[in-house]
Image: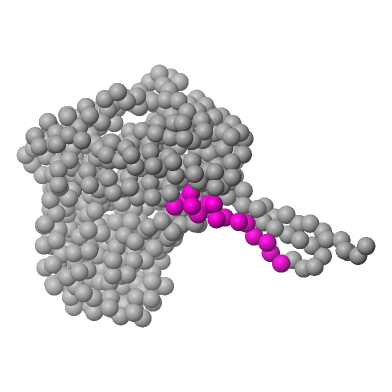
Amino acid sequence: MTDYDGTLQENHEAAIAEATDGVDFGNYIDGETVDAASGETFSPEDPAVGVALADVARGDEADVDRGVSAARNAFDGEWGDLTAMERGDALREWAAALRDNLDELALLGTLEVGKPLYAARADAETGIAFIEYYASVAAAQEGRVPDVGDDSFAYVREEPYGATGQILPWNYPILLLGWKVGAALAAGNTSVTKPPEQAPLAIVRAAQLSKGILPDGVFNVVNGYGDEAGAAVSSHDGLNKLSFTGSVPVGREVMRSAADDVTPVTLELGGKNPFVVFPDADVEEAAETAAVAGLYNNGQSCDSGTRLLIHEDIETEFLDHYLDAVADRSVGDPLQDANQGPLCYREHLEKVEEYVELGREEGATVLAGGERPEGDLSAGYYFEPTVFGDVTPDMRIANEEVFGPVQFVMTFESYEEAVEIANGTEYGLTAGVFTENASRAHRAAADIQAGSIWVNQYFGTVPGTPFGGFKNSGIGRECGKDALEEYTQDKSVHLALDDPAL
């Protein structure tokens, strides 16, 4: 890989040339890279410098139809005939091919999302690990034999749905590919995947790297915009299961579309996640963790710890450590060693700026950041790590998901007040709890309405632990063996047993 030691513009011009040279970013259908049926393309941008990356096939309903047909044929054919062990072998071989091309996938992730190169590499590695995990767990799925008495024998088969659809978000392309497509294929399904229009490149390459490993038609990728290709996936009557990660409003539209055909859906939606620090916590550790929890990936994570709920007795001590940790985070070229690159695209930057202005209007105090950086970074979609103090639970900024590098500090007086504030939004995805008291930790984990509770740490999702939300944060679970259950349906078989007497 090239050493990027020039100016920001020079670095990215060289990186774009390296990452896209000789690559056709068409749709990947039935084992081939193909143009969109319309012949149209679109061009996602490198958010660090605001320039086009590559031409990408602009798929629509016709392309989704073709992908669904290929997926259904593969399910009815070679893929459907394989055992779980044989599918697992194929998935592990694909994972090995992805690992062999990890540098390429990481570079594409940095260029299209704006995340630092080390973070893009870690995301891709984790996504690959999920594919390997699902391949192993699926081979151990054995169905069930319930006890139904002496006059009958019953067993439960776990069968795949068939052709399935995955609509992926832009913040973690390869990671979420591993979460969703890995589970779908390991369970015996086939896939039609719609990448995010802002970040389709790494997903297309991952699909191309499956050539000759996965049978043709098992994994299909249709690029395009949400209201064209995405809507066609969510409403297609040839898909038997859907999975979507994204915003609550779009998740509702996906669910409405799927309802017409009673298609089951898994939805992983937004979060406005509390990070609760009780007075007995290790304050310095909690403060340093809080800065990472809310600012990692530029805050562009559904599980970001954005609402910092700090006991009033330790607020001053916490802020001293926390604001130092925020100040230590560098903003710059994601191809270098910066902690934080640009936001993913221009419209998203503008949304974050609007929320920061709203915070000022609501009377909150900017404790750090709050502006776009100047100089060389002004050509990209950068925003400073930003912290608001004097935030109250009734403010919009305390309830609405910003999805950017912005955190909000609130205080509480009692355990009951902390739980009330923590649960006081429409979301329920994740929560952080910092305390040295084991009883308080367990009680908070039970009382806070969220799908994942992380105690004295943040970000604890690894292969084997289910991930998903309460309330408007979604339906269903991913990441653990639960994900395989999302992609299979139970079939009960009952056999009458006659009298064995001769």
The residue located at (40%, 43%) in the rendering is 95
The residue located at (21%, 27%) in the rendering is 17
Extreme top residue here? 39
Residue 409 falls in image quadrant: bottom left
In the image, residue 492 sits, relative to residue 91, either above or below, namely below
Q: Position of residue 322 (x, y in %)?
A: 15, 64
The answer, for residue 140, to whether it is visible in the render is yes
Q: Position of residue 91 (x, y in %)?
A: 46, 43
Number of residue marks: 0
Q: Position of residue 323 (x, y in %)?
A: 13, 62
Left or right of 100 in this view: 366:
left
Left or right of 151 in this view: 404:
left
Left or right of 23 in this view: 313:
left
* Rendering colour mode: one colour
Q: Is residue 140 magenta?
A: yes
The answer, for residue 229, to whether it is visible in the render is no
Quarter the N terminus occupies: top left
Residue 163 falls in image quadrant: top right
The residue located at (17%, 54%) in the rendering is 386
Q: Is residue 37 magenta?
A: no
Residue 412 vs residue 265, the one in the foreground: 265
Residue 460 falls in image quadrant: bottom left
Q: Which residues are magenta?
A: 133-147
In the image, residue 283 sits, relative to residue 398, either above or below, namely below
The residue located at (22%, 43%) in the rendering is 117
Quarter the C terminus occupies: bottom right
Extreme left residue here? 375
